[in-house]
Image (cartoon, rainbow, N blue to C red):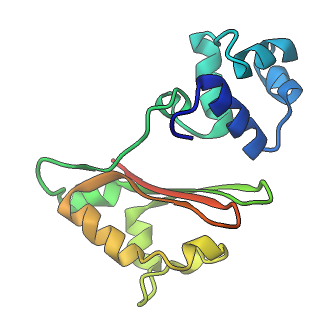
Amino acid sequence: MANQTFGERLATLRKEKGLTQSDIADKLGITAQAVSKWENDQATPDIDCLVKLSDIFGISVDELLGKKKVAEMLPTPPTEDEIERMVFRIHIISHEGDTVNVNLPLALVKIFMNDDGSISMIDGNESLKNIDFRKLLDLVERGVVGELISINSHEGDTVRVCVEK
């Protein structure tokens, strides 16, 4: 969704969720014409609608507005207690339009991680099979947080893995 206008980003997110402009309008208590104007970059939603839209799509307002979450290095490696409070946020959109959001505390990741670095709780998606969560956990232990992986498969699946404090 990089380099998209707000309207293009909104239309993409709406379609990924399998929603119509009327569906969005109903959820926000506005008209479908207002949503159409947003998607055609003829108008922009007010701040209250931005917050509601971000909730509908399961993303932050920053992401809705086009600010990409990027990985960053913490000034010092996190303590074990800080790591235990962090969360892997996995967002999957299948080429069929299904959306899955998984929020796994790192404490659970450590418990459910297999010897090969996979996590049996979330191994149903092909795009996740080649992710070595052991290596991602190693990065987090060194102080890397934010968006660690962004995959767009040739089948049209999208997978994002973020670590948040």
Residue 22, by quadrant, is top right
Residue 26, by quadrant, is top right
- Residue at 42 percent of width and 82 percent of height: 117
Residue 79, by quadrant, is bottom left
- Residue at 59 percent of width and 26 percent of height: 5
> Residue 112 location in percent, x, y?
47, 78
Identify the residue at the far bottom of this view: 115
- Looking at the image, can residue 31 be seen? no
- Residue at 57 percent of width and 32 percent of height: 4
Against 125, residue 40 (above or below) is above
> Residue 44 location in percent, x, y?
64, 12
Q: Is residue 95 left or right of residue 84?
A: right
Against 58, residue 6 (above or below) is above
Q: Nearer the viewer, residue 21 or 5?
A: 5
Q: Is residue 76 left or right of residue 37?
A: left
Against 15, residue 26 (above or below) is above
- Residue at 73 percent of width and 19 percent of height: 40
Identify the residue at the far left of this view: 76
> Residue 37 location in percent, x, y?
76, 14
> Residue 141 location in percent, x, y?
23, 65
Q: Quadrant of the N terminus?
A: top right
Q: Nearer the viewer, residue 101 or 152?
A: 152
Against 135, residue 15 (above or below) is above
Q: How many marks?
A: 0
Q: Nearer the viewer, residue 86 or 41?
A: 41
